[in-house]
Amino acid sequence: MNVPRHWREQVRRYRLLGSKCCDCEEISFPYRLVCPKCRSRKCEDYALIGKGKILSFTDINSPPQEHKYNMPYAVALIGLVEGPIITAQITDARAEELEIGMDVEMVTRKIMEYNEDGIICYGYKFRPIVKYAHP
Amino acid sequence: MNDNVAVIGVGLGNVGERWDKSLRELAIESIWMAFEDSGIDNVDALYVGNMSSGPFIEQENIGTLIADFAGLGSIPAVKIEAACGSGGAAFIEGYMAIKSGMYDCVLVTGVEKMTDVLPSKTTSILANASDRDYEAFHGVSFVALNALVMRRYMHEFNVKREDLSIFPVISHKNAPFSKHAMYRKELTHQTVINSPMIADPLTLMDCAPICDGSASVILCSEKKAREFTDAPIIVSGVGLATDTLGVHDRKQMTTLSAAVEASRKAYKMAGVTPKDIDIAEIHDAFSIMSALSLEDLGFVKKGEAAKMGLEGQYYIGGQLPINLYGGLKARGHPVGATGVYQIGELVYSLRGDGRVDAEKGLAENIGGSGSTVSVCVLERGD
């Protein structure tokens, strides 16, 4: 029974909510109850703007069973402009187009369906920021 | 408090796709071997290293299961879980039980039954060792986490994928000698380089196999051990440390901080430095983990492990022979059992198996993507 588990995370996933320490201002994602830098227990929600750079990436040919319908897909470690690093899928691009240092932005997409509860889970993915040439 | 802790018995069951044996049968097999090797058949407590008996075979409470079916009586028996590092963590629990003086003699059994489910289910279960909500939810498999670390390492230290491919070759070199190993054959460097890509830059042959297995060791005080043998193997230092659960939370993604910390503790307790270590069992679940381990245990500078490997320094006859019974790659990686296999193999090498003359050896067992690391230093007590 995974419904409450995904339900309680949805706001954080859709709005990319991490946390900020009220004492030392360290920003974390995922959110923390205890600041990993100064151990303060005063942490508040902090919305990240969803932009960053690819620090590393891979493409997955042998996925866990709950993701097999998405195959193939790329995942990356993304250094967000506010400081935290986030693990997420890359969308709107093929793995061979990716490179370390590439600018990416957050979008909300479907992460998985056909899981054991039949619910469709949405969440953040990141896509390369493309500069279009206008006519 | 007891003085020194010694290993007096080892039992290493065959590793492989053992469809004809259940988890309890695998465990009992290695326990009987360890009893026979030690000459005793009574212990005060059992510590079971196991990662995922629940998801794999829908069985928990396996401390009791094994104590019951192995006929160990009503002794204390618990499961110790630290993902793929469960075996090493269980060994350290056993060590502390003897060292404290609480018990005279304990059994540490590592066991994992992985092949009762389909491989894609196994991939999903192994991903439970990462952050379920913030890593695995996004479809990141365990191989993928290692691939992310590997690409970053290649980028930061200017190391080629093909250079890191030497590590499976090194582990397989020793496998034909290893009676309990899953793949008792050598591998060529080209085979590793050309094998199918699982998660770029990691190929199939960079990854340790899914399998079943069980290993047991018996620990007691050195004083008691000397009643049985003139040449006990002494556990001279142990260290266990954790790092962030998620790879994304590491300040340095390409350093196993837990390995740095655990080895610092183990070296200090044993009164040694990395230079004093003659042989090592390294957690080569993925080629990149071999490189990070050798560097962060202090055997070689950052970025230079693959170069040393290509020079032949990690084969028997080199500066630091590693994975003398095939490592995780060739012996196999029955996850929760692996750390106990490593200890048993180290004991075999230190007792003398005709290949190396080693005084001191080290075993390093990693749980998760480096989130738990145990390091044990063993030495000859003769």
Image: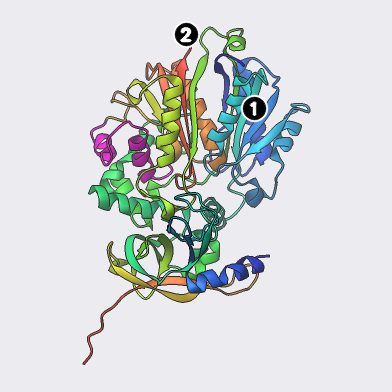
Which residue sits at x=64%, y=27%?
A: B31
Does B301 appear in magenta?
yes
Q: Residue furthest toward the front?
A: A23
Disc nearest the viewer among 1 and 2 = 2
Chain letter belonging to callout 1 = B
Does B78 appear in magenta?
no
**Circle 2 crowding by C-alpha within 10 Å: few under 14, some 14–19, many from 20:** few
Q: Amino acid at mark 1?
A: Ile
Say which quadrant the N terminus of chain A sits in. Answer: bottom right
Q: Is residue B67 above or below residue B202?
A: above
Chain letter belonging to callout 2 = B
- Residues rendered magenta in the picture: B285-312
- Give whichever of discs 1 and 2 has the lower sequence position: 1
Q: Position of residue A70 (x, y in %)?
A: 47, 70
Name the quadrant containing residue B30. Answer: top right
Q: Residue furthest toward the bottom?
A: A135
Q: Position of residue A51 (x, y in %)?
A: 36, 70
Residue at mark 1? B31
SS for dot 2: loop
Which residue sits at x=45%, y=27%?
A: B266
> Residue B382 — which label?
2
Q: Amino acid at mark 2?
A: Asp
Q: How many marks?
A: 2
